[in-house]
Image: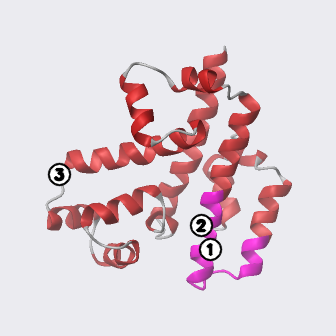
Amino acid sequence: MRKYIYGTLIGLGVLILFGGGVAWASVGHGFWSNGPFSEGLAKLLGISTDELKVQVQDKTLPQLLDDKGISHQQLYDLKEDARLQPQADILGMSLDDYKKELDNGKAFSQLLDEKGIGHVQLQEKMKSQMKERITQRLQARVDDGEITQEQMQERLQNFDQDDGGYMMRGAGGFRGLRHMMDF
């Protein structure tokens, strides 16, 4: 039962953290700004994240990768690192150490138990990560002049008042994130 609960929480958190980025990418927002994937992709391409945001306006991701000779395996490794980094952060481990533990056959839930991280702590850490990502994305929209600083603060206040529950409980899913971000 405990593994089921952890699995559900982890799956929901990953879906919210990364699913929101994918949904946002489809309308040209925060996915390309200051996230673990975009930062890693920019580094892999040998450009800044600002240059990446400009280049994706003119080219598709496959075109950018082909231009720089980036292999499918390199992109897969980058995506995998972006997927695993939030879990490593929750555990307070480096990405390399976390990957070594996974390679040694340990599950995320086992590592949570070993670190003494319970359900409440896990949910708090996931909420903190979610708020950080939402703040970054909202700030990018403020910087681009799409919303005001006051609108950003109002949305963050709504997130705090609901204690992130609308999304953390999964009731909103993508709709919850879309509602929060006001696409």
Residue at the disc numbered 1: 139
Dot 3 crowding, Cα within 10 Å, few <14, some 14–19, many 20+: few
Q: Does residue 143 show up magenta in the picture? A: yes
Vertical side of 174 occupied by 43: above or below: below
Q: Visible in this render: residue 116?
A: yes
Q: Earlier in the sequence, mark 3 or mark 2?
A: 3
Q: Tell me the amino acid under the disc marked 3.
A: Ser
Q: Residue at x 68, y 29 (%)?
A: 117
The image quadrant where one finds the N terminus is top right
x, y percent for residue 156 = 75, 64
x, y percent for residue 103 = 36, 25
Residue at the disc numbered 3: 71
Q: Could you tell me how far apart the alpha carbons at marks 1 and 2 are, in whole angstroms?
A: 5 Å
Specify the quadrant of the image occupied by residue 157.
bottom right
Q: Tell me the amino acid under the disc marked 1.
A: Gln
Position of residue 131 in the picture relative to residue 89 (left or right)? right
Q: Residue at x 76, y 33 (%)?
A: 120
Instruction: Report the magenta residues as a range.
Output: 132-153
Residue at the disc numbered 2: 136
Q: Could you tell me how far apart the alpha carbons at marks 3 and 1 are, in whole angstroms?
A: 32 Å
Position of residue 41 in the picture relative to residue 134 (left or right)? left
